[in-house]
Amino acid sequence: MPRLPIPAGMSDAAGRSPLAQGALLALATAALLLAPFLVDALLGRAWVRVLDLVMLYTMLALGLNIVVGFAGLLDLGYIAFFAVGAYLYALCASPHFGLHLPFWLLLPAAALVAGLFGMLLGAPTLKLRGDYLAIVTLGFGEIIRIFLNNMNAPFNLTNGPQGITMIRPIEVAGVSMAKAHAIGPLSIPSLYNYYYLFLVLTLLVVFVSARLQHSRVGRAWVAIREDESAARASGVNTRNLKLLAFAMGASFGGIAGSLYASFQGFVSPESFGLMESIMVLCMVVLGGMGHIRGVVLGAALLVTLPEALRYIGPLQRWLFGQVHIEPSDLRLLLFGVALVVVMRWRPAGLWPSAIRHREFAAARATADNAVTGHRTGGSADAGSAP
Amino acid sequence: MNVGPEPLLRVHGISKAFGGVQALSGVSLEIARRSIYGLIGPNGAGKTTLFNVITGFIAPDAGTCTLDGRRLTGEPVHRVVQLGVARTFQNIRLFHQMSALENVMVGMHARSTAGALGAVLRTRRVRDEEARMEAAAHALLERVSIAAHADAPSGSLPYGLQRRLEIARALASSPKLIALDEPAAGMNASETASLRELIDALREDGTTVLLIEHDVRLVMGLCDRVAVLDHGQLIAEGVPAAVQSDPAVIEAYLGAPAAPVATAVR
Amino acid sequence: MLGSIYALVALGYTMVYGILGLINFAHGEVVMIGAMIAISVIVAIGTGSGLPAPAVMIAGIAVAIPACMLLGALLERIAYRPLRDAPRLTALISAIGMSIVLQNVAMIVWGRQYISFPPLLPNEPHAVLGATVTGTQVLIVALTVVLMGALLLLVHRTRLGRAMRATSQSPALAGLMGVNVDRIIMFTFMIGSALAAVAGVMIAGYYGQAHYHMGFMLGLKAFTAAVLGGIGNISGAMLGGLALGVIESLGAGYIGALTGGFLGSHYQDVFAFAVLIVVLVFRPSGLLGERVAERA
């Protein structure tokens, strides 16, 4: 897994010796560095693009993970921050306003502006919980999209539904990501460039997430998620920490958005609809809310699966002689089914964090022994009463 | 009487109404330093409301609470904790998916400072603070005799230990006053006995304890002073023996027909 | 007009919320499916037989209602019942999943295009007291009034209604008193879905078309209406629906003037959200609600 060996004690849990850890790290580094070459050779250039998108969505999902996974604030309008980052980059590095600000300036700016938006939209929702929060954030997300769609008049800020085109590709230290470069005998195509850039930034996001998780701030977030009143009673300033979660999550989204804009070269409001928010949420939830590796897995799965679904068209033709259901129509349907199924049978996600795992196991054990009734709580299974 | 010249907590003229129900009317009391103070009364008497007012969860309509001369009323809950009042809950509220140790470390939130930037950069100061907190949390778990379960998810602990863990979490904020909401509820005799020892030990260490309890015997045996609430009013206050023989108290407990439903005031 | 449709849909939200304390995220999709089924039936009958228009119309509704009730029951059984004791977030996500499933099944079955509603309804305008109304509009309002009256009777005057009210107060206690809580919750979903079916037919008739995506916006607005009126409160849902309809049409009409031409009527949808956010932030109990909107 793309993971830096930071949180002390994490890898010890698996009981590996330092040598084995070192070997594993070397192996992972090699795999990550060689990934585009391997994927290109085995599956084709189109899949390198998919690889790039996996990185992009991993950043996005890890941002949402801070809000939903750590702090337990169900944000259904998260894609708005992705949009803010994307539009910021698009406006400042395209012929639309004739601005061509450099990447190293725009990336932090996108994080900052999106973070501000996160606080701005988070502030009115501080007192709301659960489903109300979900609906209000959903509303904010839609409002931002509607504005993007309509702010072409009287002053043409966003160019309306057509979106903004000809966005300048990223240039790092004079090296354009959009061109192939030769390093010795190797030719590094554009998609590879993006891969390495995104990889570095994704690792950075993973690093920041992991550090936050195992810190005073991360613990306070989880406390808020678990029981807000108890968190307050423990001295946690829930208002500030929620705002911080909104801001941090949004700034990750903003970073991912600005990268997306330059990668695609084009942004339009339809890329930032509710379904996109839900897809990112799926990545977080299916992977394992609050668990960084789980979220990375979720993002990887949900980006690659729709690509794999393309093969369903030919499969149908081969099986039934014709295409009954368009593969693209199946994508969201399967997401929906996955959400229901996972919530029913694996509510902690496909790859839950160790403590959730332990807790579920422990809960089962106590239930089996029927030592105490502390878990039966208010459920009282009313339906089975005579 | 024997209340010292400078009480730790001073509750003055607290009133609170919910809708049409007057939950508290003009309640005043003082809690001396290093004492165990009991708050009792029939269901619906306003105990929990008063408790929530003192700990900052409910803003009173009138009156003030001061701790060591500093005003608590009007401060948000986390500030109240910072000023030195920690609490537990009647229905235990732990962070179930965190380990016992982490629960206690959350309790130290008000006494630590690392922010997001510090967490990411892991400066020396942050590392030191983290190490200090972990050691202190271990010591607290030791204190309430659940050190063996430090890494267990708190939700998996048996009931009695969850109560202790909640007390440890409250102690983690180094409170001057710890407020316990029916800590013996649902405990068996031996659990109650060891809880009693724990509370006694807290006072020995210089912490002041405020106790709401249904178990009148526990309160009378443990507390230095007791206040009795009925229908939102303070009807008696004093040392346990005096309160026990107070006719108003006897009437409140025995004379009143079926007590009104508690949930009306909660 | 729209207000009465919002009100009907809002009832579904409010009833489920009242009894489970959860938002039925897939309710808008039930409305959409109701509309789709009714149109399919109407088109199927209408082309061949020489039946009179009202009969065809009634046949469409008559099929849509039980179909939606079944759907509501399924929804409850699949997405809600197994998760009743789980954290709220879990049930919420599961409901979002169901909503996506229904939307995409509808898309696969009925296609991505707008489906037009056969011109069965009287659409010639009449002048009444200076305003122009069409037969459809009168029909919508009349039907809404009748249905709401029936619902109020059901909730306040029947055994089933009493059991529903008891369950919403305390499921555990109602269970002890001999109420079959599972059945009551399922009934609640079914009644809400029946109303949704009617609302679906109405809105398809009103706009003359239906689309697999129509449930989302409609559901959201109806939810807003429910919150505006005070969620969990049946009369509140009716009032909220009507109020939102008025706010929206006035808002869309005057937004240009209000903002000096900066914002146009295509911001109409923003109104529902703005109302929702303002209400939730400043008066979470809504216009008629007494209970605090948030239950931990």
Image (cartoon, coloured by chain):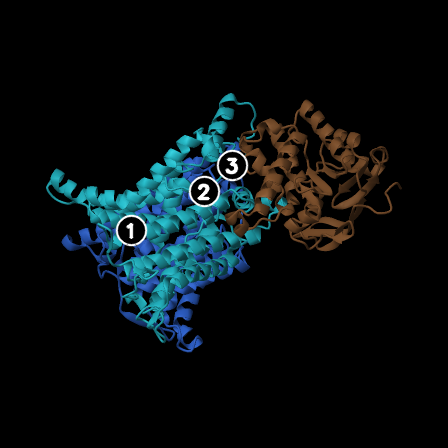
Chain colours: A cyan, B brown, C blue
* The disc label shown at residue B97, or none: 3
| Labels 2, 3: one chain | no
- Determine contact: label 1, label 3, CB under 8 Å: no
Mark 3 surroundings: few (<14), some (14-19) or many (≥20) residues within 10 A: many
Q: Is residue C24 visible?
A: no
Q: Position of residue B121 (x, y in %)?
A: 51, 49
* Image mark 1: chain: C
A348 over A267 or under it: above or below? above
| Labels 2, 1: one chain | no
Taking depth in this image into account, of C235 and B156 the one nearest to the observer is B156
Q: Position of residue C13 (x, y in %)?
A: 43, 50
In the picture of the structure, the residue carrying the numbered disc 2 is A290
Please tell me whether mark 2 sits on a helix, a strand or a loop.
loop
Please tell me whether mark 1 sits on a helix, a strand or a loop.
helix
Amino acid marked by disc 2: Gly
Taking depth in this image into account, of B180 and A216 the one nearest to the observer is A216
Q: Position of residue B130 (x, y in %)?
A: 58, 42
| For discs 1 and 3, the disc positioned in front in the rendered view | 3
C166 over C248 or under it: above or below? above
Mark 1 surroundings: few (<14), some (14-19) or many (≥20) residues within 10 A: many
Amino acid marked by disc 1: Ile
| For discs 2 and 1, the disc positioned in front in the rendered view | 2
Residue most extreme to the front: A184
In the picture of the structure, the residue carrying the numbered disc 1 is C61
